[in-house]
Amino acid sequence: MKLEKDMLRLYAITDRGCLRGRDLAQQVEAAITGGASCIQLREKNVSYEELVREAAALKKVCAAHGVPLIINDDWKAAVESGADGVHVGIEDAPVDEIRALAGKDFIIGATAKTVEQAQAAEAAGADYLGVGAVFPSPTKTNAVRITPEQLRSICASVKIPAVAIGGITRGNLCEIAGCGQAGIAVVSAVFAPDDVKAAAQELLAAVNKCL
């Protein structure tokens, strides 16, 4: 799947802890019908085989709606499951190595916290950047914070699109308006509320108003 900038408008990242026992595929579909334009499956504590199974099941949901499915960290599981791409952190497999092995149509996202990291990821073949944490994050309490000015500098330094990530809510979203990001990536803001579809709808409305 070719990544389009609009696919990054509301990028929803799964977290089993937020679901409180609710079915993952059902909640992902609710997020998509509410306006999520990209889904990332993030599972830190499952086996490779279980990750591939979950990814394959979610791929069917995402494909039915024309929404890309990205797998966190594990590009091999992404390829095996038929997912559309992977998102890698600074400590994960190098973007250029993944690109060489996974092919040109495989979506690769990369984390960037500095202009130098952003430009290196773009040069290595990344399709988009995840930039943050722009606010304190409940899912990554030790995440390095970046300022709106740093976000603006990173977005301006590359040609590929970027999503802002880290503690973003409807209440603080407008604080990062005008920084050049294509959209926002969120975890708990979509998947923690009881009504995931409504949460996605409200967040997308806020994105369209502020960004």
Image (tube, rainbow, N blue to C red):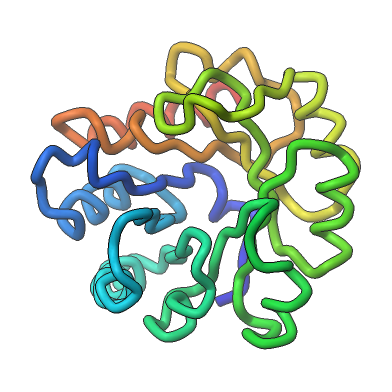
Residue 206, percent across and down? 47, 24
Q: Is residue 7 left or right of residue 53?
A: right
Q: Toward the viewer: 54 or 107?
A: 54
Residue ID at (69%, 50%):
129
Residue 110, percent across and down? 67, 55
Q: Is residue 197 among what the camera can see? A: no
Q: Toward the viewer: 117 or 62?
A: 117
Quarter of the figure with residue 192: top left
Number of marks in the image? 0
Q: Toward the viewer: 152 or 90?
A: 90
Q: Toward the viewer: 113 or 130?
A: 113
The N terminus lies in quadrant: bottom right
Residue ID at (82%, 37%):
114
Q: Is residue 163 left or right of residue 202?
A: right
Residue 172, percent across and down? 51, 13
Q: Is residue 128 among what the camera can see? A: yes
In the rendered view, tell whether residue 17 sits above or below residue 129.
above
